[in-house]
Image (cartoon, helix red, strand yellow):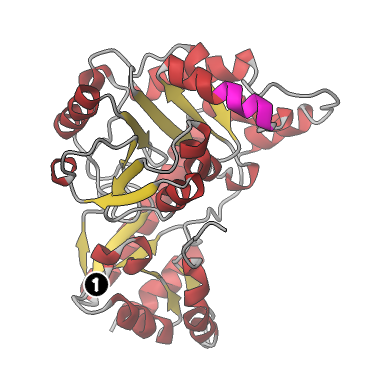
């Protein structure tokens, strides 16, 4: 039996119940799930591809891989070979199973940020490897890890790693022959700075050797229910992933592939969604700061990383008494014990309700 951590969100249920008892109803700013409609262009593509009587390709259609490569080039300045692109059934699935798919196992170490999405740890445990949360790669000691995760823009902090820092990380990993994987699911949601991909030539020198980048359409296109993501990077590593996933039947449905093509080819709906999130972010940031919170990092992503310099569960309890539910920071590691994560994925009406409750 694999020892897995308790599912963190179960601990939040009593606080949710408190928030739900508020006369004005709950304002749920805890889980960053999209609340706005999936774009019509995406839904139409899904419908038109619904006569899916044959098996789709694990590799994804040529049209999908070419759409990914075109998006990487157009939006991120990344030049990727469509042959080095592979769809995933949502990026959480790929985060959880990547170490196993690549043969990482007992005796190996998987490194991830000290403040991080919990699934990096879960993926290491599923593979039987050791989980190593780290504040910096230079603190790891002499043992060489099998895989290193970075997350930029980061969840929960919204921190963006600049190109100069990423170049150092790439150099460190290549000197040691370590696979470096960058989770870039929020890369189109930069607010006070412009995030850069690990696959950008300014970071990697034009070579994707030893590098992978993960991307998701859940947030930028409101497609969380479609389970639509992909990985791109080192062609030899992508090929290894493809071979294992073919044997395991890890295949994205054909209609979802068609929907991804439509989403990746349309920038207008992304700009519209960014504007929604920008308005909500501005309103919530101002309200929480006026209420006495300090907002740290939060340069990008869909979250504010906030603190009143008190234990995170005390903050969560106080906000729940106002009918506002947030995520305690220690969900993401001990270093988050005095912060909470505030998602701005609520509707405009619910954001306005939160602002009213936080206004003296």
Q: Quadrant of the N terminus?
A: bottom right
Residue at the image point whose x is 30% and y is 41% from the top: 152
Given residues 355 and 259, the one toward you in this image is 259
Residue at the image point whose x is 32% and y is 31% from the top: 180
Q: Main secondary structure of the magenta part?
A: helix
Position of 59 relative to 23 (above/below): above
The residue pinned by badge 1 equals 338
Given residues 131 and 268, the one toward you in this image is 131
Q: Is residue 258 visible?
A: no
Position of 324 relative to 231 (above/below): below
- Residue 30 location in percent, x, y? 45, 66
Residue at the image point whose x is 62% and y is 15% from the top: 63
- Residue 160 location in percent, x, y? 24, 42
Residue stretch rendered in magenta on the structure: 242-248
Residue at the image point whose x is 48% and y is 76% from the top: 11
Quadrant of the rendered image containing residue 318: bottom left
Quadrant of the rendered image containing residue 245: top right
Q: Secondary structure at mark 1?
A: loop
Position of 39 relative to 202 (above/below): below
């Amino acid at each position: 039996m694999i020892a897995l951590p308790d599912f963190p969100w179960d601990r939040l249920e009593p606080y949710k119940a408190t928030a739900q008892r508020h006369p004005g109803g709950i304002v749920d700013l805890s889980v960053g799930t999209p609340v706005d409609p999936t774009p019509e262009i995406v839904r139409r593509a899904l419908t038109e591809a619904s006569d899916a009587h044959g098996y789709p390709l694990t590799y994804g259609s040529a049209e999908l891989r070419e759409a990914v490569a075109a998006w990487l080039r157009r939006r991120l300045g990344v030049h990727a070979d469509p042959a080095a692109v592979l769809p995933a059934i949502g990026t959480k699935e790929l985060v959880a199973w990547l170490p196993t798919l690549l043969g990482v196992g007992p005796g190996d170490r998987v490194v991830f940020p000290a403040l991080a999405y919990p699934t990096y740890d879960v993926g290491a445990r599923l593979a039987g490897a050791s989980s190593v949360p780290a504040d910096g790669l230079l603190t790891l000691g002499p043992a060489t890890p099998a895989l290193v995760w970075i997350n930029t823009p980061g969840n929960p902090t919204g921190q963006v790693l600049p190109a100069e820092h990423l170049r150092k990380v790439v150099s460190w990993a290549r000197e040691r022959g370590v696979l470096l994987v960058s989770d870039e699911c929020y890369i189109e949601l930069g607010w006070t700075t412009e995030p850069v991909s690990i696959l950008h030539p300014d970071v990697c020198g034009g070579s994707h050797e030893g590098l992978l980048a993960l991307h998701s359409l859940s947030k930028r296109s409101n497609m969380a229910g479609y389970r639509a993501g992909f990985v791109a990077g080192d062609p030899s590593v992508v090929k290894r992933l493809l071979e294992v996933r073919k044997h395991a039947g890890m295949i994205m449905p054909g209609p979802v592939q068609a929907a991804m093509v439509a989403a990746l080819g349309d920038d207008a709906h992304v700009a519209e969604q960014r504007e929604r999130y920008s308005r909500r972010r501005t309103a919530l940031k101002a309200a929480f700061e006026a209420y006495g919170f300090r907002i740290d990092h939060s340069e990008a992503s869909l979250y504010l990383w906030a603190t009143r310099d008190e234990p995170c569960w005390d903050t969560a309890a106080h906000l729940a008494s106002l009918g506002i539910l947030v995520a305690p920071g220690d969900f993401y590691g001990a270093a988050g014990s005095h912060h909470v994560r505030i998602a701005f994925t609520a509707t405009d009406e619910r954001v306005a309700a939160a602002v009213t409750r936080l206004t003296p």
